């Protein structure tokens, strides 16, 4: 009789399992694309990315204020002091490939939260610096690595959440750099004047802690395959739990069962055996759940590592894409020219005796404000069906390179302000960088590819300002710094112009010519 009872329990469990399987298949077939793509939570991700650019990149573009304080405090050469700002900017971007590994294994949200804490810690520790070398490690390295851990996820998440308006979304999010440059420049000026640069860095460190909140807003976006797999796993877990409950609850619900006209009475010994067997089954299922979790974690880490490794060193390496390699060469040569005005413009204004005019219309603020409009307008143009984002990208780069070359020739403050405005507008091409990169390598490789691009930018930013400072120490003029860096920028643009020769025939950046659609 006990044997019949077990057979009956098994048959009921099988029926329950089939029912759950049918429900699982039905829910899998109904899997749809995430509704948050191009709407819903996607705009919260844009807001998060905007605040990251405001707090991270905006702070770094306003370092010219602190650079002057450090020159006065530590009485070191301009070349050595400029290394503090360069390390912070450079390391933020150089760590990009390694942050790509973190993103592949831990996800964007966790990476950004950890990075926000490190950035805030770097600002606070820098307030206790006793010399420039102390700032190298606290502000340059610690805050630089933390900023990199927040910056890359902010760019990647916007690319994942948008398909139709990628350029515009990236443009809106990256306008945080312009707003941050303007606001944080004013804030640091006020704080340094009222409380001194050390207390100013502590206050800014507290403000920067909000990057952790920005990271928390970066909710992962699951693909259809991931949603289906997760749904299947959940139903499988429910199925196992239901079978256990059915097996555990059966003896407790039926003390006496009538079958074939006979009343069976279970003995105490049989009840004891059933209870023990049920406890064993429950323990086994619990252990199985723990093993499943560990297995999923291990598989996730291994998969993330091999995806990262194959992107750089495998057969499908990004460096087999010739256009992408030319893009990396441009990034190596160009970025140093962009950051030099932000670091050295306050000193140039002071050297030429334009402090009074600069207090009314600060040059860095002019660049920052126009930079905001440049990113939005260039991003809007990049999304038009009749315009190639690649061509807009090259045209804005060419304009920026020319402005860097002619900036030292401006002997009137008004003319210098106009050139700075052009620099701000043309540098809005940063909103197109993630879009152009995605067009080159695809969305799956965006994190790793963009990590390489910003790493190249970081190397350029690391060497540019100290190079300009050393040239000034030798010549007592910044003119030659801008000339050399401007020529390097133009050389980088030549690498971009080689794109038609390097691009395979079956792949083209140009969009089909049709009526412009907004």
Image (tube, grey):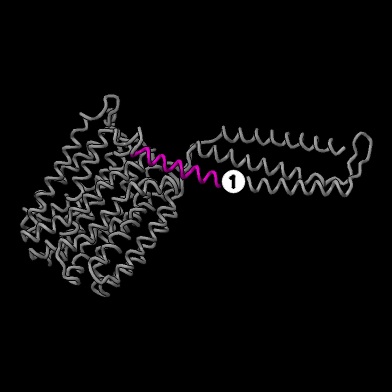
In the visual, does 24 lie left or right of 371? right
When the figure is inspected, residue 384 is found, relative to residue 374, above or below; the finding is: above
Q: Quadrant of residue 433?
A: top left
Of residue 318 and residue 389, the one placed in the foreground of this image is 318
Q: Position of residue 375 (x, y in %)?
A: 26, 47
Does the stretch in magenta take in 309? Answer: yes
Which contiguous range is marked in magenta?
A: 290-312
Which residue is at 44% across, 46% downward? Answer: 105
Q: Can the viewer see residue 167?
A: no
Does the stretch in magenta take in 436? Answer: no
Which residue is at 68% across, 46% downward? Answer: 284
Q: Quadrant of residue 163?
A: top left
Residue at the far bottom in the pictured view: 195
Q: Position of residue 364 (x, y in %)?
A: 19, 58
Query: The C terminus appears in which quarter of the rendering?
Result: top left
Query: The N terminus appears in which quarter of the rendering?
Result: top right
Magenta stretch secondary structure, dominant: helix
Which residue is at 33% across, 69% downward? Answer: 202
Residue that numbered label 1 is attached to: 291
Q: Position of residue 152 (x, y in %)?
A: 35, 49
Of residue 513 and residue 399, the one placed in the foreground of this image is 399
């Amino acid at each position: 009789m006990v044997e019949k009872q077990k057979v009956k329990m098994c048959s009921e469990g099988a029926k329950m399992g089939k029912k759950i399987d049918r429900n699982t298949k039905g829910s899998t077939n109904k899997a749809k694309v995430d509704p948050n793509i191009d709407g819903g939570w996607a705009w919260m991700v844009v807001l998060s990315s905007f605040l990251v650019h405001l707090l991270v990149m905006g702070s770094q573009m306003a370092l010219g204020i602190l650079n002057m304080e450090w020159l006065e405090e530590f009485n070191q050469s301009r070349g050595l002091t400029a290394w503090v700002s360069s390390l912070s900017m450079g390391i933020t971007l150089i760590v990009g490939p390694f942050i790509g590994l973190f993103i592949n294994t831990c996800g964007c949200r966790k990476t950004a939260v950890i990075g926000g804490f490190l950035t805030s810690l770097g600002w606070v520790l820098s307030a206790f610096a006793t010399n420039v070398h102390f700032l190298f490690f606290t502000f340059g390295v610690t805050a630089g690595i933390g900023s990199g851990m927040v910056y890359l996820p902010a760019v990647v998440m916007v690319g994942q959440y948008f398909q139709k308006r990628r350029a515009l979304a990236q443009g809106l999010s990256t306008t945080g750099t312009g707003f941050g440059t303007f606001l944080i420049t004013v804030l640091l000026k006020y704080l340094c004047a009222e409380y001194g640069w050390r207390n100013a860095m502590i206050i800014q460190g507290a403000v920067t802690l909000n990057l952790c909140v920005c990271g928390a807003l970066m909710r992962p976006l699951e693909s259809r395959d991931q949603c289906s797999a997760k749904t299947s796993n959940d139903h499988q877990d429910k199925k196992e739990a239901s079978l256990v409950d059915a097996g555990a609850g059966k003896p407790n619900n039926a003390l006496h069962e009538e079958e074939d006209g006979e009343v069976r009475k279970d003995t105490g010994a049989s009840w004891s055996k059933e209870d023990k067997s049920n406890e064993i089954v429950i323990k086994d299922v619990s252990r199985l759940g723990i093993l499943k979790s560990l297995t999923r974690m291990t598989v996730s880490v291994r998969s993330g590592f091999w995806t990262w490794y194959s992107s750089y060193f495998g057969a499908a390496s990004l460096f087999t894409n010739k256009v992408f390699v030319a893009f990396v060469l441009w990034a190596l040569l160009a970025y140093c020219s962009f950051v030099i005005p932000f670091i050295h413009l306050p000193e140039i204004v002071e050297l030429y005796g334009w402090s009074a005019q600069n207090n009314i219309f600060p040059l860095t603020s002019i660049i920052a404000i126009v930079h905001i409009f440049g990113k939005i307008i260039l991003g809007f143009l990049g999304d038009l069906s009749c315009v190639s984002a690649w061509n807009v990208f090259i045209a804005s780069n060419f304009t920026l390179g020319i402005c860097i070359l002619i900036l030292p020739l401006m002997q009137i403050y008004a003319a210098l302000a106009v050139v700075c405005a052009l620099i701000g507008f043309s540098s809005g091409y940063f909103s197109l960088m993630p879009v152009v990169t995605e067009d080159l390598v695809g969305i799956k490789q965006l994190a790793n590819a963009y990590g390489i691009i910003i790493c190249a930018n970081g190397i350029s930013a690391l060497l540019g300002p100290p190079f300009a400072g050393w040239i000034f120490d030798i010549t007592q003029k910044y003119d030659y710094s801008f000339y050399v860096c401007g020529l390097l920028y133009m050389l980088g643009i030549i690498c971009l112009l080689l794109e038609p020769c390097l691009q395979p025939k079956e792949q083209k950046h140009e969009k089909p010519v049709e009526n412009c659609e907004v």
